[in-house]
Image: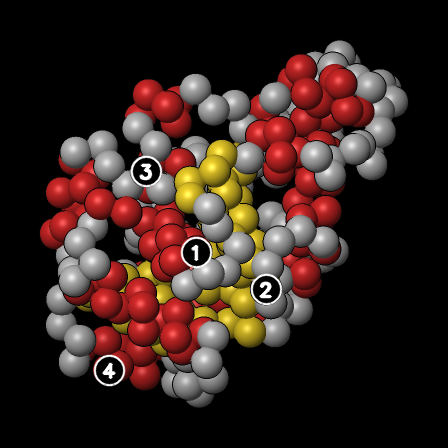
């Protein structure tokens, strides 16, 4: 199964991705977590310290690897020929970070075009890697993405089985989430879901949802606001440090049960 987790900045997308990845791995699924954000920080949410995470070079910024695999160094200028089908089938083994026996992280970084508008070797390598894992690798691939699904384009986005969009329990945040989910639908992701995060009043969420999603075609799930997430982050720890009995861990278990029932 291939799962895309999207959402506007600040809604808790990365924390939600980490919670999902850990819960799925604890249930025995082999999980490959991919961070494709332009400011990747999934590593910290998965338990690496700030110092450890800061040493990771995303695949889309790894100029040395890009030169080795594509035959061209990033920044060599216009008109440079390089391979768009570099060897990538060993990158999980070489660059994957094992968090537990079932969970591996690869920091891909942003796959958007470079500022000059050209497809640079490093971006080509990152996209080839994503295409490979979305087609072939692992029992579950969970992608922590930038906002929306449009950065994946046709050919990548359509490989996802599920798109989960994270939002806060406000009218404005839900309206933005609806637009992002519409992008996913346009890119032919069949199964869409809404995760309403940081919920303090569970009775208010269904009313807000009905205002924005009047046709009720997209299922929604709620994750409680939980101080233990903030406490863990302030101690430079990941979601594994959050107590199993905490509200958000209970909600994540229910979410996973719903997704895999």
Q: Mark 4 and mark 3: span between their CA atoms? A: 36 Å
Q: Mark 3 and mark 2: span between their CA atoms? A: 24 Å
Q: Which of marks 3 and 2 is nearer the N terminus?
A: 2
Q: Which of marks 1 and 4 is in front?
A: 1
Horizontal relation, residue 183 to residue 208: left or right: right
| Residue drawn 17% across the image and 75% down it | 202
Q: Nearer the viewer, mark 2 or mark 1?
A: 1
Label 3: element kind: loop
Q: In this view, does 79 lie above or below 140?
A: above
- Bin the neighbour count of mark 2 within 10 Å (Cα to Cα): few under 14, some 14-19, many 20 and up: some
Q: Which residue lies furthest to the top in this view?
A: 76
What residue did someone put label 2 on? 1
| Contact (Cβ within 8 Å) of mark 2 with mark 1 | no
Quadrant that contains the N terminus: bottom right
- Bin the neighbour count of mark 3 within 10 Å (Cα to Cα): few under 14, some 14-19, many 20 and up: many
Q: Measuring from the top left, give residue 170's x and y in whole percent.
A: 24, 65
Q: Earlier in the sequence, mark 2 or mark 1?
A: 2
Horizontal relation, residue 31 to residue 211: left or right: right
Q: Mark 2 and mark 1: span between their CA atoms? A: 13 Å
Q: Nearer the viewer, mark 2 or mark 4?
A: 2
| Contact (Cβ within 8 Å) of mark 3 with mark 2 | no
| Contact (Cβ within 8 Å) of mark 1 with mark 4 | no
Q: In which quarter of the image is residue 243?
A: bottom left
Q: Residue 47 carries which label?
A: 3
Q: Which of marks 4 and 3 is in front?
A: 3
Q: Measuring from the top left, give residue 231's x and y in whole percent.
A: 13, 43
Q: Measuring from the top left, give residue 54's x and y in whole percent.
A: 39, 22
Q: Which mark is residue 25?
A: 1
User: Can residue 83 be seen at all in this image of the molecule?
Assistant: yes
User: Can residue 165 be seen at all in this image of the molecule?
Assistant: no
Q: Mark 3 and mark 1: span between their CA atoms? A: 14 Å
What residue did someone put label 4 on? 207
């Amino acid at each position: 199964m291939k799962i895309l987790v999207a959402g506007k900045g600040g809604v808790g997308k990365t924390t939600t991705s980490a919670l999902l990845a850990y819960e799925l791995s604890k249930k025995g699924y082999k999980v490959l977590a991919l961070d494709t954000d332009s400011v990747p920080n999934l590593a910290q949410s998965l338990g690496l310290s700030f110092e450890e995470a800061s040493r990771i070079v995303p695949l889309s910024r790894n100029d040395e690897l890009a030169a080795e695999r594509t035959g061209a160094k990033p920044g060599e200028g216009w008109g440079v020929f390089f391979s768009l089908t570099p060897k990538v089938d060993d990158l999980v083994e070489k660059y994957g970070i094992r968090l537990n026996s079932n969970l591996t992280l690869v920091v891909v970084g942003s796959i958007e075009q470079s500022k000059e508008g050209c497809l640079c070797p490093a971006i080509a390598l990152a996209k080839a890697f994503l295409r490979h894992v979305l087609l072939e690798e692992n029992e579950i691939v969970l992608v922590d993405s930038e906002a929306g699904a449009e950065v994946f384009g046709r050919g990548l986005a359509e490989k996802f089985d599920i798109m989960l969009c994270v939002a806060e329990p406000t009218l404005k945040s839900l309206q933005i989430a609806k637009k992002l989910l519409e992008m996913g639908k346009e890119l032919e992701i069949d199964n869409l879901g809404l995760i309403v995060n940081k919920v303090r009043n569970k009775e208010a969420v269904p009313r807000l949802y009905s205002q924005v999603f009047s046709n009720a075609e997209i299922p929604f799930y709620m994750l409680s606001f939980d101080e233990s997430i903030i406490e863990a982050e302030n101690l430079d720890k990941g979601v594994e440090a959050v107590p199993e009995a905490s509200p958000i861990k209970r909600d994540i278990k229910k979410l996973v049960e719903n997704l895999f029932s």
